[in-house]
Each structure stands twice: as C-alpha cells, then as structure tokens.
Image (cartoon, helix red, strand yellow):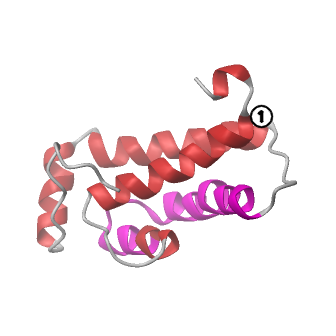
Amino acid sequence: MTASVGAWRAASAMLRSTLEKTLKHNGYLKGSLADKIDQAAEDGVITAARSKRAHEDIRVLGNDILHDARRVVFQAEFDLAHKYAQRILEDLYDDRPSVTALLAEKLRLPLPANQAAT
C-alpha cells in the first residue's frame, strides 16, 4: 500500500524491516542486520550475490532513511530494493522443505509460524 501511493521512503524502510524479521524468523537471531545477512550467506541460505544486494540495496537504504531525516528516496531505488527483497523471500520460502533442512543442519531453528519475529 505504501509504495502504491508513491511513499518510497516509508516503503523502503518497510523492506528493511521485512528483511530483518524474515531472517529472525529463519533462526538468525543474534547481531545486527548486517550480521544476520552475512550469517545467512555463510550458511548458504542466500547466495553471495543476494547478500551483496541485501546489504547495498535494502539494508543501507533503510539505514539511510532511519538516520537521515533529509534523505529522499526515488522510485528507482525502491524498485531495486523491492526486487531483491522479493528474491530473498523466494529463496527462503519457495522450496521451504530444503531451506528448513539446511537451517536444521546449521543448527538454526526457524520460529514457529504463530510466533511473531520482533
């Protein structure tokens, strides 16, 4: 809804939040968002390319928004962040049994579906 009305700044902040909550839901509970992204890449849950995009196009953009009151976000920036957030979600949920097995192998326990990742 936020992006549909051109609120690129707010929508971009929500993508950052979604990424962090998704990683928490998948057992990446410790450290900063940067640490969680790196851990997911090290575990092979996301690719190195996705990790780079998660850092550059989602995390850094979100941090800029949270810490710079004057930071304007353009649609092209949001679109790129949205594209990679969607791909990361697909990596984690399209073949859920494989991801769950990998998370178990890495001793990461996904949070139960009824438990919110806060």
Q: Is residue 55 above or below residue 9?
A: below
Q: Is residue 118 above or below residue 96?
A: below
The kind of secondary structure element at disc 1 is: helix
**Residue closest to the eye, 86 or 5:** 5
Task: Report x, y in % for residue 84.
Answer: 55, 46
The residue at the point 50 percent across, 57 percent down is 50
Q: Which residue is mark 1?
A: 75
Q: Main secondary structure of the magenta part?
A: helix
Q: Residues within 10 Å of mark 1 (few under 14, many from 20)?
A: some
The residue at the point 19 percent across, 69 percent down is 108
Question: For the N terminus, which image quadrant?
Answer: top right
Q: Is residue 3 above or below residue 71?
A: above
- Under mark 1, the amino acid is Gln
Task: Report x, y in % for residue 97.
Answer: 13, 47
Task: Reply yes or no: does residue 112 show up in magenta.
Answer: no
Q: What span is colored magenta in the figure?
A: 38-67
The residue at the point 40 percent across, 69 percent down is 41
Q: Left or right? Give the position of 56 relative to 42.
A: right
**Residue closest to the eye, 80 or 13:** 13
Q: Is residue 111 above or below residue 97?
A: below
Task: Reply yes or no: does residue 50 show up in magenta.
Answer: yes
